[in-house]
Image: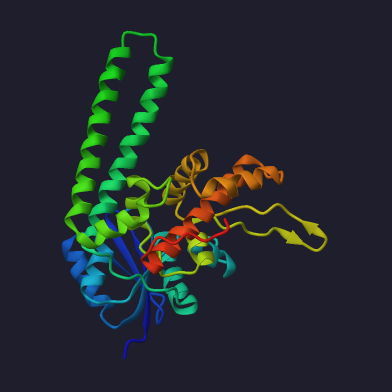
Amino acid sequence: MKTRFIGIDIGKAQLHLAHSESDDVTVLDHDAQGLQELLAYCKEARLVVAEASGGLEADVLEALHQARITVALINPKQARDFARALGRRAKTDPVDARMLARFSQRMRPCPQSPPEPAQIALKALLKRRRQLVTMRASEKCRLAQSRTEWTQSVRRHLAFLTEEIVELDRRIDDLVQHDPAVAARAALLQSVKGVGPVLAVTLLASLPELGTLSHKQVAALVGVAPYSNDSGQKKGKRAIAAGRAHVRSVLYMAALSACRCDSPLRPFYQRLLEAGKPPKVALTAAARKLLTWLNAIVRDQQLRLPHPV
């Protein structure tokens, strides 16, 4: 019977493993041999928990999924908050592994579903695209301030980055069109005004839960749900927090585009402004409304916007 709850602290060179039945920590190399030893260690696991580690966790998750071992990936902040709640302020790799094992046993986070191959490929391409867009934005700022002999160097680098982004866009489009199911979902999402290829692909790659959650759950997952800050007679200002930042940023820009054009979202945004809401608050609410629509559209597999807006 699978009884062990396991925590894995994932590093670039090493993997630290702990389980609920002991305080001992096993250290493995983060390589092909180490992954095989990891699978042997976890074969009797009821639930394995790991932290998101900036992409270092990708091969670990893939190996666990292929071995049909139940695994959950959590935000590092969740683990640190859990450790502080237990009065553990020290932070080392062995301590983190033990805390993740206890988190697995006590909190029982929702397991992660194995991603589809198309989703993995799209995530990799989108990650690289975000990196290039960030570099291009930095170079544009340098160009605006440059009055030296290096101006032409900046221009050449800008041109190179733009070509690379165009090439990535082409590869992303080819990948989407190659999979009929993905292409159909992308077309359904883009049928809403303001939703372009970048947002559609971002949702497909980084928000696979879209269409399977309630509107409140998906808003919290992306980080566009306002949280209360009240205590006694005090009524604090509500604010959004956490969530998937890169999805939220793309969604925000799509909502901005939709609010500027003749879209069903524009009256909602204008009504909030007329009610005295600050523009940024109104735009965040519009982004949440857009996400709610897209969630319903994917769930029902048909374009049906709620009315009235």
Q: How are the residues colored?
A: rainbow
Q: Which quadrant holds residue 225?
A: bottom right
Q: What percent of the width, then of the height, locates residue 269?
A: 59, 46
Quadrant of the frame with the C terminus: bottom right
Of residues 130 and 42, the one nearer the viewer is 130
Of residues 205 and 103, the one nearer the viewer is 205
Q: Is residue 33 visible?
A: yes
Horizontal side, residue 282 vs residue 260: left or right? right
Q: Is residue 1 above or below residue 151?
A: below
Q: Is residue 49 above or below residue 258?
A: below
Quadrant of the frame with the N terminus: bottom left
Q: Residue at x 37, y 52 (%)?
A: 191
Q: What percent of the width, then of the height, locates residue 262?
A: 49, 42
Horizontal side, residue 194 vs residue 268: left or right? left
Q: Residue at x 18, y 70 (%)?
A: 36
Q: Which quadrant holds residue 236?
A: bottom right
Q: Residue at x 48, y 44 (%)?
A: 258
Q: Residue at x 56, y 54 (%)?
A: 241
Q: What percent of the width, then of the height, locates residue 196?
A: 36, 45
Q: What percent of the width, then of the height, locates residue 195?
A: 40, 48
Q: Is residue 146 above or below residue 48?
A: above
Q: Is residue 11 visible?
A: no
Of residues 37 and 146, the one nearer the viewer is 146
Q: How many marks?
A: 0
The residue positioned farthest toward the bottom in the image shown: 1
Q: Is residue 215 above or below residue 267?
A: below
